[in-house]
Amino acid sequence: MPSARYILIGGFLGAGKTTALLRLAERLKREGRRVGLITNDQSVDLVDTARARAAGIPVEEVTGGCFCCRFDSLVQASQALTRATAPDVLLAEPVGSCTDIKATVGYPLRQLYGNDYTVAPLSVLVDPLRCAGILGLLPGRQFSDKVVYVYKKQLEEAELIVVNKADLVDDALRGRLDAALGQALPRSKRMYVSSRTGEGLDAWFDLLARGELGNAPAMEVDYDRYAEGEALLGWLNAAAEVSATASFDGNALLRDLARGLHRRLAARGIPVAHLKLTLAPSTGPDLAAVSLTRDDEEPQATHALDAPLDRGRLVVNLRAEGDPEQLRESAEAEAAAHAPVGIRLTGVNAFRPGRPSPTHRATGA
């Protein structure tokens, strides 16, 4: 039996990894290939998993830590998909605050399971406006230095730096960003794509379909600094039951929730890394999803409900540089502010990620 192609797509929170993976899965399915997706998070109740299921993609979750720290769980998820659907291609999306993916996931997969999987080059997705700000090309508030350290390490290990959302920047800024990335990371191939418009996707997907993970020595990582940077990011995963005495517009509710929660965080001086929400009716496969990835943008709908509803299930995933308890308080206050629609929180998990402790770390060649 031929080995399955294993595609890891990393990148910072809000870079558009899930949307890009769903576009890739759609293309592979059109080509007649079987696809499986593995999502990853520090906690449970994942928006990304709901979006994959709504798209009809077989999906498994690895929760409670990143792929590097839950490597055995990643392998088990891969094997579960293999037993269930025998995918030709496995797509895996690491946690957006993770780095050192090649050394702790890609190389171990190849060395320990090389007969089962052919590992594709590591892509790291980039939001061009966030990246331009971090590289000093645009003004505005940025994350703390230790969070920026994690961001830059993600770029450093990339074999393919994929600047997503390329439709958001003009030619002048694209040129300045390309020059800065080329000067800082001359060994990485740079590509410009848009998961929204389709620009550049075919060329990127073709590279993933035929290329293989390289053998460069693993980069040096200061795990103390990495752990401190990741721990500055507050995590909130929440689930809620939504109900009303009359049908309501779930798409509008989701946008209002995102805007309101963002305003509350801004009032506390908490910068958002990524805010994602889904709302699904109690029955049927319908889904609404909204995403906000930067403080200077409006919530963007990625999925819309086809009809009004009177009850459903809400999931909120929030990543921001702030105290987790303040994230919890903001979410609870916003949930209470939407009468006559009732939003009853059934589970809230607010925390800071623990120190990364990889199961394996391979040097490369």
Image: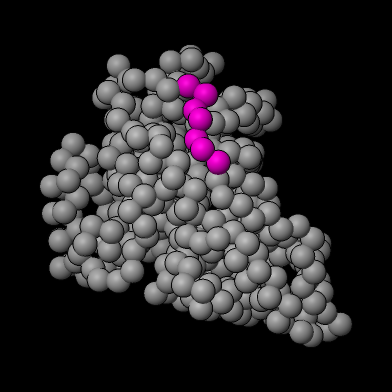
Please report the residue visible at 61 percent of the width from the left and 52 percent of the height from the top. 351
Image coordinates for residue 64, horizontal then vertical, percent: 63, 40
Please report the residue visible at 55 percent of the width from the left and 45 percent of the height from the top. 353
| 143 displayed left or right of 97 | left
- In the displayed structure, would residue 223 be above or below residue 320? above
Residue 241 visible in image: yes
- Asked whether residue 356 is drawn in magenta, I would say yes
| 65 displayed left or right of 152 | right
In this picture the colour scheme is one colour
Residue 151 visible in image: no
Q: Residue furthest right?
A: 245
- Asked whether residue 144 is drawn in magenta, I would say no
The residue lying toward the viewer, choosing from 2 and 324, is: 324
Image coordinates for residue 44, horizontal then vertical, percent: 67, 48
The residue lying toward the viewer, choosing from 60 and 239, is: 239
Quadrant in which the N terminus appears: top right
Image coordinates for residue 13, horizontal then vertical, percent: 45, 54
In magenta, the rendered stretch is 354-360
The residue lying toward the viewer, choosing from 119 and 177, is: 177
Please report the residue visible at 33 percent of the width from the left and 69 percent of the height from the top. 141
Q: What type of secondary structure mainly makes up the magenta span?
A: loop
Image coordinates for residue 227, horizontal then vertical, percent: 45, 41
Number of numbered discs = 0
- In the displayed structure, would residue 75 be above or below residue 50? above
The residue lying toward the viewer, choosing from 207 and 100, is: 100
- In the displayed structure, would residue 334 be above or below residue 174? below
Quadrant in which the C terminus appears: top left
